[in-house]
Amino acid sequence: MTSTPTATLSHSPAQQTEANRAIAIEFLRRASAGHAREVMRRYAAPTFAHHNPYFANDADTLATAMDENARATPDKVLDIQRTIAEGSFVVAHSRVQQKPGDAPIAVVHIFRIEDGRIHELWDVAQPAPVDSPNQAGMF
């Protein structure tokens, strides 16, 4: 995985797209494990904006909330099911289980990454129903 931001000029468009995908994956894995402040310092752009309506839109507020969640739910599992990357945008569809035995939550994160920095982040979440008529499921 990419450990430091990479400049767009040093990569072809396809390589930059894959580098963006690696940044998004590393960000999600490290942040969900309680290292949100660390990955924010590494990857958040100075103009970082988060679009979750329940928090202020700055990197520090989001990092604090993510690190607090990791401390409160140390057994949380984030399993990235798939990613879609196109240019500066990366979408990750994940299965999140806060505690053993909890019903999973489907979470979609959308990143806008430019020059190795996350400029914007959106997320939407939906609990997986216990009894669903859809046999294909959410994952």
Image (tube, rainbow, N blue to C red):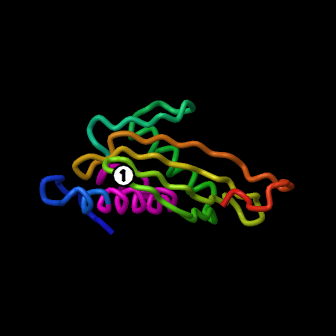
Q: Position of residue 39 (x, y in %)?
A: 36, 55
Q: Residue at x 26, y 38 (%)?
A: 46
Left/right placement of residue 3 relative to residue 76 reads left
Number of labels in the image equals 1
Amino acid type shown at disc 1:
Glu
Q: Quadrant of the C terminus?
A: bottom right
Q: Position of residue 73 (x, y in %)?
A: 63, 58
Q: Residue at x 41, y 46 (%)?
A: 111
- Secondary structure, mark 1, is strand
Q: Position of residue 118 (x, y in %)?
A: 33, 46
- 32 vs 100: above or below: above
Q: Residue at x 47, y 44 (%)?
A: 64
Left/right placement of residue 36 relative to residue 134 reads left
Residue 32 included in the magenta stretch of the image: yes
Residue 17 included in the magenta stretch of the image: no
- What's drawn in magenta, residue-wise? 18-43
Left/right placement of residue 77 relative to residue 91 reads right
